[in-house]
Amino acid sequence: MQEVKQALISVYDKIGLEEFARGLSELGIKIISTGGTAKFLREKGIPAEEINEVTQFPEILGGRVKTLHPAIHAGILARRDNAADMETLAEHRISTIDLVVVNLYPFREAVAKPGVTLEEALENIDIGGQTLLRAAAKNFRAVGVVVNPDRYENVLSELRATGCLRERTREELALEAFAHASAYDLAIHEYLEEVHRDKSEGASPFPLILQPTYRKSKDLIYGENPHQRGALYDEIGVKRVPGVAFARQLHGKEISFNNLADLDAGWDLLREFEEPTVAIIKHQNPCGVACGKGLPETYRKAYTCDPTSAYGGVIVVNRPLDETTAKEIAPVFFEVIIATGYEAGALETLKGKKNLRILEFPAGEEGGQGTTWQLMQISGGMLVQEKDAILIRREEMKVVTRKKPSEEELEDLIFAWKVAKHVKSNAISLAKGKQTVGIGAGQMSRIDSLDFAVRKAGERANGSVLASDGFFPFPDSIHRAAEAGVTAIIQPGGSIRDGEVIKAADEHGIAMVVTGIRHFKH
């Protein structure tokens, strides 16, 4: 194994550096470093030789050129088992560099700041650091490269044991370095492409090359089914978006693939509402949604929509959960609950359920529009679309029937429309008093979805309003809605039989509003 005699340290993030560098120095490992890092180490009493003392050449161009020198890169790239390489080092009096510790200028953080200019962004593109880590990673058979401060302890422990790094360790470090370099380049590409699109009138919003990048957060117990393996990855693009992937688990057994899929569906739905709202999700469909003034009442309204389907589902709440609501939730079997926070009494109550997974939205991440693109993998490629983030406004809705909806019906129509947007198509949502009373999801015909929603609602369908995510191809659904007691309908419109559909609504005295917007969700 290759003994580590000399290390190059050049880092922006100095977390954990003092202890790590001191440990290297105590092992007799010589440290060479760039200006800012060298100054930091010397202030801590750790000896470090500056790069310009090694290269006999000063930093130039305001620090843009520091480590880009043969005296540095030859020491990293030389193959220790290649006689010609080692003779070249000896001829030019260049020492080998056995460990490279580098992390890069914080480009993502820099461009995420409001009002950042292109010039500021360009100055935060790391060149020397990227070159160092790529050179060291390429020559991992002889050189260790550390880009993650979380690795310091393990690396130091191995060096203390043997004075060397195992080849397996060096290979793992190199893989991490190349992944880090790739993600860094992607962040630059994403930012500059966005700048270019903003300057190009009529340019497609979709990038020419799509390179989504994610970092594995954890392995999951399994995927959609026990025979499928699964994992959770965090998005690490330039603009990290809020989302369930960053939620914090406070209690319960390990979160599953299906739990996370259901939580994401519920989180997406609740972003439509500003008032206190509770959604119960099963198989990525809502089986009960309600808005209210207080959470206990709101939870009861959501649960009573479909208690049978709610069993084993997940609860999503857009407010901190209080103890009273927690006590109402506790007797029912739910897989997961997620809220924006928990009162102490609420958390204590829910923790009494051993297997209930309790999660909390990260601070400030329960709102916002979420990810910009939606991706769906198909064999041989990827489908990409903009997220369906459009919201209906009252002034955009058009009443097409003789009867106009009342103010109360209008509020319920908007509520039902928001819910239907998050139900698998063909989607029908029945609502009354900002509470779903019946939901029909994922049927191959719209009238089948309607029949399912009506059956779930039972007598509660009488006096309810109806939202449909797509137009009605025939008036048969209107006749069925009338039989159930529906008083108002909201739908996109656009069918070649719109006239017949509107006529049927008039015949039954049903108010109908069209939006001109479709919300299919496959």
Image: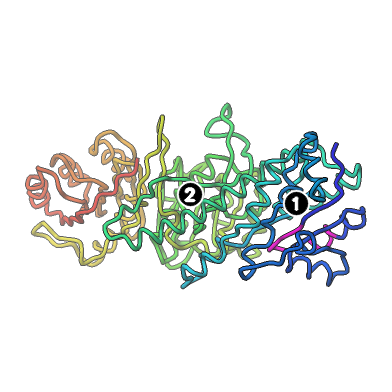
Give residue 179's position: percent from left, percent from top.
Answer: 61, 45
Read off the residue under disc 1.
Answer: 100
Read off the residue under disc 2.
Answer: 264
The answer to if 19 sits in the magenta stretch is yes
Name the amino acid type tagged 2: Asp
Give residue 439's position: percent from left, percent from top.
Answer: 34, 45
Name the amino acid type tagged 1: Val
Say if 474 sits above or below 197 in the image: above
The answer to if 175 sits in the magenta stretch is no
Q: Which mark is residue 501?
A: none
Residue at 55%, 51% (x, y): give it: 245
State which quarter of the image contains the N terminus: top right
Q: Residues within 10 Å of mark 1 (few under 14, many from 20)?
A: many
Residue 71 appears anywhere in the view:
yes
Magenta residues (range):
9-21
Is label 1 in contact with label 2 (beta carbons under 8 Å)? no
Q: Residue furthest front?
A: 91
